[in-house]
C-alpha cells in the first residue's frame, strides 16, 4: 500500500477550491494507492477554511500567514509525521488539473525518481505563460544548470511529486520565499534525483499567483540570492 | 567642568536609569541591554575625561576628534542593526514552526474528537 498525500496550499482560494477538491476526490488512482488530501489554509481572509471543511479531507489551518513556503512545509511536516510515502503539491487555484496527477504517479512508478516535476514547457498545448515569464524561466533554467547540473525547464512549477526522502528534507528545511526554484538546489545538494515530465496546465480559475510580477528584476535577484546561498551551504567554504 | 560636560553626564545617567527600569519591568531582555549599557559607560567616561577623545584621535590618526566619535558610533550602530536582524530572523523562524505545529495539533484534536463521537 502506497500512502499519498495531496498538499493544497491555499490563500484566498475559496472560489476555486471546491472544483479542485471534487476532481481530486473523483480521481481513480492505481488500486494500491491510498490518497489523502490536506488543505493548508494560510490564514486566508475569505471562506477557504469553511469550504475545505465541507469535504472529507485534512485541513491544516495556520493562525499566522506564513507565505507559500511555510504553508507547503506544513504539508510536508504532516506527511512525515503520519508516515506518507509520497506527497504531491497541487495549487488550490485549479492551475494543476488533478487528472495530470496520474502522469506523475505513472512516471514515479516506472523510475522511482525522488522528485517528479510536472512541467508546462515540455508539452504541446495547454496553458503557456507570457513572454516575460518565459524569459524568467529560461534564466532559471540556466541558473539551475549551473548550480545543480540538472536541466530543469519549469523550475517555478509547484506541481511536484515527492518521495519519502524528499519529504524528509522538505519537512526539515523548505525555503520560505519562492520555494519552488530554491528547493531544487536544496534537493540537488542532498543528492536526490529530479526529473521533469510534460503536463498540461490550465489557467488559474480565480485568485492570484504567489509570484506576482514575475518579470520584476527584484524577484529574479531574490531567487538568485536564495539559490546561491542554499548552494553555498553545501560547500564547506562558507 | 564645562556646561556641556554636565549636560551629557546628566543625560547619560537618565539614559542608564531608563534602561535599568526597562529591565526591571521585564520590557527589555538583559542580553539586548548590555550593548546599551556599554555605550552609555563609554559616553560617561569620555564626558569626564575630555582629553581622552583627543588622545584617541591621535592614536587612530584621525585629524578631527568629533569625526572619530561619528565613525565609531556609526560602526557600532551598524553592527547592532545586523544583530537585530539576526534576532528577528530567529523569531520569524520560531513563529513559523509554532504556527505549523499548532495547525497539526488542531487537526489531530479534531480527528480524535470525531472518532470519539463515532464510538
Image (spheres, coloured by chain):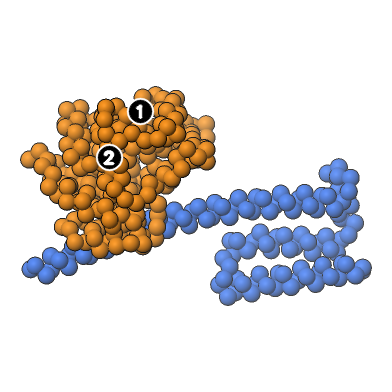
Query: Could you say where residue A176 lies in the image, as x and y percent from the top left?
Result: 42, 47
Specify whether residue A228 is in view: yes
Q: Residue at x 41, y 44 (%)?
A: A211
Q: Is residue A236 left or right of residue B24?
A: left
> In the structure shown, which secondary structural element does the residue marked by tag 2 occupy?
loop
Pick the front one: A10 or B94: A10
**Badge 2 sits on which subunit?**
A
The image quadrant where one finds the C terminus of chain B is: bottom left
Which residue is the site of mark 2?
A: A202
Query: Could you say where residue A160 lies in the image, as x and y percent from the top left?
Result: 28, 38
Q: Residue at x 27, y 37 (%)?
A: A201
Q: Quadrant of residue A98?
A: top left
Chain B pictured colour:
blue
Q: Is residue A24 left or right of residue B2?
A: left
Query: Could you say where residue A134 lies in the image, as x and y percent from the top left?
Result: 41, 31
**Badge 1 sits on which subunit?**
A
The answer to whether A157 is drawn above or below residue A22 in the figure is above
Which chain shows up in orange? Answer: A
Which residue is the site of mark 1?
A: A152
The answer to whether marks 2 and 1 mark residues whose Cβ atoms lie closer than 8 Å is: no
Q: CA distance from mark 2 to mark 1?
A: 20 Å
Q: Residue at x 44, y 53 (%)?
A: B93
Specify whether residue A229 is in view: no
Q: Residue at x 31, y 45 (%)?
A: A204
Q: Is residue B73 left or right of residue A151?
A: right
User: Residue at the right extreme?
Assistant: B2
> In the structure shown, which secondary structural element does the residue marked by tag 1 occupy?
loop
Pick the front one: B84 or A201: A201
Q: Earlier in the sequence, mark 2 or mark 1?
A: 1
The image quadrant where one finds the N terminus of chain B is: bottom right
Q: Is residue A16 left or right of residue A133?
A: left
Amino acid at each position: 500500500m502506497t500512502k499519498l498525500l495531496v498538499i493544497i496550499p491555499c490563500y484566498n482560494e475559496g472560489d476555486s477550491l471546491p472544483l479542485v477538491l471534487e476532481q481530486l476526490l473523483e480521481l481513480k488512482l492505481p488500486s494500491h494507492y491510498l490518497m489523502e488530501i490536506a488543505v493548508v489554509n494560510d490564514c486566508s481572509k475569505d471562506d477557504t477554511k469553511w469550504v475545505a471543511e465541507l469535504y472529507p479531507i485534512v485541513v491544516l489551518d495556520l493562525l499566522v500567514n506564513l507565505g507559500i513556503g511555510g504553508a507547503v512545509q506544513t504539508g510536508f511536516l504532516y506527511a512525515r509525521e503520519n508516515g506518507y510515502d509520497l506527497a504531491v503539491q497541487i495549487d488550490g487555484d485549479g492551475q494543476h488539473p488533478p487528472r495530470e496527477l496520474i502522469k506523475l504517479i505513472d512516471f514515479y512508478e516506472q523510475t522511482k525518481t525522488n522528485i517528479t516535476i510536472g512541467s508546462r514547457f515540455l508539452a504541446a498545448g495547454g496553458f503557456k505563460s507570457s513572454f516575460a515569464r518565459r524569459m524568467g524561466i529560461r534564466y532559471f533554467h540556466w541558473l539551475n544548470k549551473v548550480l545543480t547540473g540538472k536541466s530543469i525547464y519549469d523550475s517555478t512549477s509547484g506541481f511536484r511529486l515527492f518521495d519519502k526522502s524528499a519529504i524528509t528534507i522538505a519537512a526539515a528545511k523548505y525555503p520560505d520565499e519562492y520555494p519552488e526554484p530554491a528547493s531544487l538546489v536544496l534537493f540537488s545538494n542532498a543528492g536526490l534525483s529530479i526529473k521533469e515530465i510534460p503536463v498540461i496546465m490550465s489557467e488559474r480559475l480565480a485568485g492570484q499567483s504567489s509570484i506576482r510580477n514575475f518579470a520584476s528584476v527584484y524577484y529574479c535577484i531574490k531567487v538568485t540570492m536564495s539559490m546561491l546561498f542554499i548552494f553555498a551551504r553545501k560547500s564547506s567554504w562558507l | 567642568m564645562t556646561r556641556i560636560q554636565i549636560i551629557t553626564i546628566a543625560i547619560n545617567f537618565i539614559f542608564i536609569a531608563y534602561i535599568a527600569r526597562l529591565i526591571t519591568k521585564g520590557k527589555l531582555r538583559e542580553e539586548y541591554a548590555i550593548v546599551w549599557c556599554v555605550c552609555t559607560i563609554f559616553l560617561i567616561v569620555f564626558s569626564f575625561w575630555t582629553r581622552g577623545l583627543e588622545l584617541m584621535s591621535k592614536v587612530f590618526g584621525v585629524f578631527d576628534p568629533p569625526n572619530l566619535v561619528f565613525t565609531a558610533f556609526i560602526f557600532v550602530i551598524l553592527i547592532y542593526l545586523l544583530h537585530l536582524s539576526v534576532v528577528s530572523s530567529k523569531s520569524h523562524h520560531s513563529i513559523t514552526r509554532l504556527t505549523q505545529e499548532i495547525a497539526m495539533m488542531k487537526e489531530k484534536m479534531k480527528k480524535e474528537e470525531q472518532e470519539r463521537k463515532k464510538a
